[in-house]
């Protein structure tokens, strides 16, 4: 069933019934994970994608996990169903505010368990992160970043007093070659160097160095301007849908080293997230689904995601689904 059949035609369930089912499985998975007697079995489950596992594969996995294959199968099925319900809610909002949050969770205690790398908390955060509010997840991420920066020796240093060891790179950027210079100088940086401070020296159109006082501000300007240019559809790296959502262009090969440029864009976005820099990049939903790897899951619905790429094609396919290919052909000819 597609989203229209579920939410407009109510072919399977009424909305109230869907809410009851979603609430039941949301709490069931949370309580079941907490009751697992051997946390190491969760850790091993965590490192394996069980959503597409065959019964024989699950039997082999369970031999080393001290958890029955039946329980593994049930957990996998429940997670799959919950994922379907949650993803549908993302496309077609049918739940009230804070519906997916588990009221019994204390954020401070949950975060404490994550710091101690306790398997229950790690499993829940990976598979059902929606049970914790987005605000708490962002705070947790910022805390992890601060801890990593502290280990790298770059936390708490002012822009003017940065230790040279805390600087990952110093790059020279010509105003009229922002993308090209940025790509050439940042593409080969190691992950550790990207996590550290990056100093940007702009060079104006006359070939003279520009004066920059706030180093973070200069880097932010470089980041925002570079992203603005690479996401411009005229560059042919990205294309916009009818509602102006971005996705990788099928014609990106026109650009030399287009795959490396995509990697460069990914690094810039990762750096923005790492530094807490907000960038306005409206990606298409189907592309975000691919980035998250959900298109490989057995519960993935390409038809529902198609609407965020090409609504006219989506309507045509759903019409064929409802009316049949002959009716569609006659309508098209008329």
Image (cartoon, helix red, strand yellow):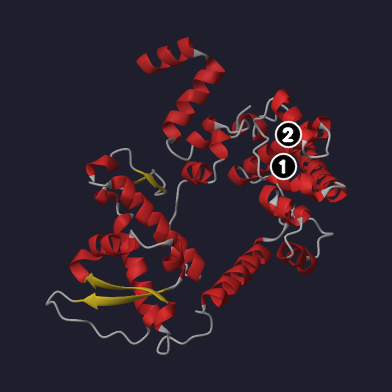
Q: Which mark is residue 305?
A: none
Q: Secondary structure at mark 1?
A: helix
Q: Give the residue pinned by disc 2.
A: 61
The x, y position of residue 158, in whole percent, is 46, 87
The x, y position of residue 280, in whole percent, is 43, 62
Circle nearer the viewer, 1 or 2:
2
Q: Residue furthest front?
A: 64
| Residue 334 seen in the current view | no
Question: Dot 2, crowdedness within 10 Å: few (<14), some or many (≥20)?
Answer: many
**Marks 1 and 2, how far apart in space?**
8 Å
Marks 1,2: beta carbons within 8 A: yes
Quadrant including the C terminus: top left
**To which quarter of the image does residue 265 belong?**
bottom left
Quadrant including the N terminus: top right
The x, y position of residue 268, in whole percent, is 40, 61
**To which quarter of the image does residue 73 belong?**
top right
Q: Give the residue pinned by disc 1.
A: 45
Q: Secondary structure at mark 2?
A: helix
Disc nearer the start of the sequence (1/2):
1
Q: Nearer the viewer, residue 33 or 91?
A: 33
């Amino acid at each position: 069933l597609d989203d229209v059949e579920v939410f407009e035609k109510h072919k399977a369930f009424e909305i109230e019934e869907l809410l009851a089912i979603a609430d039941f499985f949301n709490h069931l998975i949370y309580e079941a994970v907490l009751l697992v007697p051997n946390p190491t079995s969760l850790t091993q489950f965590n490192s394996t994608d069980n959503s597409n596992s065959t019964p024989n594969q699950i039997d082999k996995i369970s031999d080393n996990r001290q958890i029955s294959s039946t329980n593994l199968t049930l957990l996998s099925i429940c997670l799959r169903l919950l994922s379907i319900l949650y993803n549908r809610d993302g496309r077609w909002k049918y739940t009230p505010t804070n519906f997916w949050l588990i009221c019994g969770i204390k954020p401070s205690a949950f975060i404490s368990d994550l710091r101690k790398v306790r398997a229950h908390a790690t499993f829940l955060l990976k598979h059902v992160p929606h049970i914790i509010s987005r605000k708490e997840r962002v705070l947790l991420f910022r805390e992890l970043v601060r801890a990593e920066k502290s280990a790298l020796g770059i936390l708490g240093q002012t822009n003017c007093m940065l230790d040279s060891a805390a600087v990952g790179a110093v790059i020279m950027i010509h105003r009229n070659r922002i993308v090209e210079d940025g790509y050439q100088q940042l593409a080969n940086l190691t992950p550790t160097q990207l996590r550290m401070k990056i100093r940007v020296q702009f060079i104006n159109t006359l070939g003279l160095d520009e004066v920059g006082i706030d180093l973070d501000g200069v880097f932010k300007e470089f980041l925002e301007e570079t992203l603005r240019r690479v996401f411009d559809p005229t560059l042919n790296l990205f294309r916009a849908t009818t509602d102006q959502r971005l996705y990788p262009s099928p014609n990106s090969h026109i650009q030399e080293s287009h795959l490396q440029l995509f990697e460069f864009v990914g690094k810039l976005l990762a750096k923005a997230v790492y530094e807490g820099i907000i960038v306005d990049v409206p990606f298409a939903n189907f592309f975000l689904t691919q980035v998250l790897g959900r298109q490989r899951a057995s519960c993935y619905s390409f038809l529902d995601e198609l609407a965020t790429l090409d609504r006219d094609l989506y309507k045509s396919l759903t019409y064929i689904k409802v009316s049949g290919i002959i009716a569609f052909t006659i309508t098209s000819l008329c």
